[in-house]
Amino acid sequence: MSEKQTETRVAVISIIVENPDSVSQINEILHSAADYIIGRLGIPYKRKNISIISVVIDAELNIISSVSGKLGRLSGVTVKTAYSRS
């Protein structure tokens, strides 16, 4: 009898950081999901004094939602997530 594989989805979590004090918390949250993260790109945008981070993740929906939700509750952090269809 074969085990049922857990269904995962690929998603891109887009993060805009307007509060530099939240960066350490962002890193802690992303570190806790390190096993699921495919890649991460961070761009400091000095002209607007913000940072933009894109995180590509392959995980179960509840894990992606949890990471996105934790990030979105941080002060000065805006988060949007786009999911693959399968």
Image: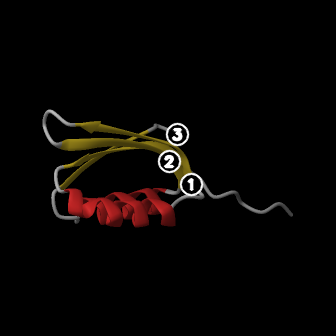
| Pointers 2 and 1 in contact (C-beta within 8 Å) | yes
Q: Which quadrant holds residue 43?
A: top left
| Pointers 3 and 1 in contact (C-beta within 8 Å) | no
Give the distance between the C-alpha atoms of the residues marked 2 and 1, in whole angstroms: 6 Å
Q: Which quadrant holds residue 53?
A: top left
- Residue that carries the numbered disc 2 in the rendered image: 57
Estimate the x, y position of residue 64 in percent, counting from the top left.
43, 56
Q: Is residue 5 left or right of residue 86?
A: right
- Colouring used for the render: secondary structure
Q: Residue at x 15, y 57 (%)?
A: 76
Relative height, residue 59 to residue 83 (above, below): below
SS category of the residue bearing label 1 = loop
Q: Nearer the viewer, residue 56 or 9?
A: 56
Estimate the x, y position of residue 24 in percent, counting from the top left.
34, 64
- Residue that carries the numbered disc 3 in the rendered image: 86
Residue most toward the front? 46
Amino acid carrying mark 2 in the image: Ile
- Between circles 3 and 2, the one closer to the viewer is 2
Relative height, residue 41 to residue 79 (above, below): above
Estimate the x, y position of residue 10 in percent, counting from the top left.
50, 43
Q: Residue at x 55, y 58 (%)?
A: 34
Estimate the x, y position of residue 49 in percent, counting from the top left.
15, 42
- Residue that carries the numbered disc 1 in the rendered image: 36
Q: Quadrant of the N terminus?
A: bottom right
- Between circles 3 and 1, the one closer to the viewer is 1
Amino acid carrying mark 3 in the image: Ser
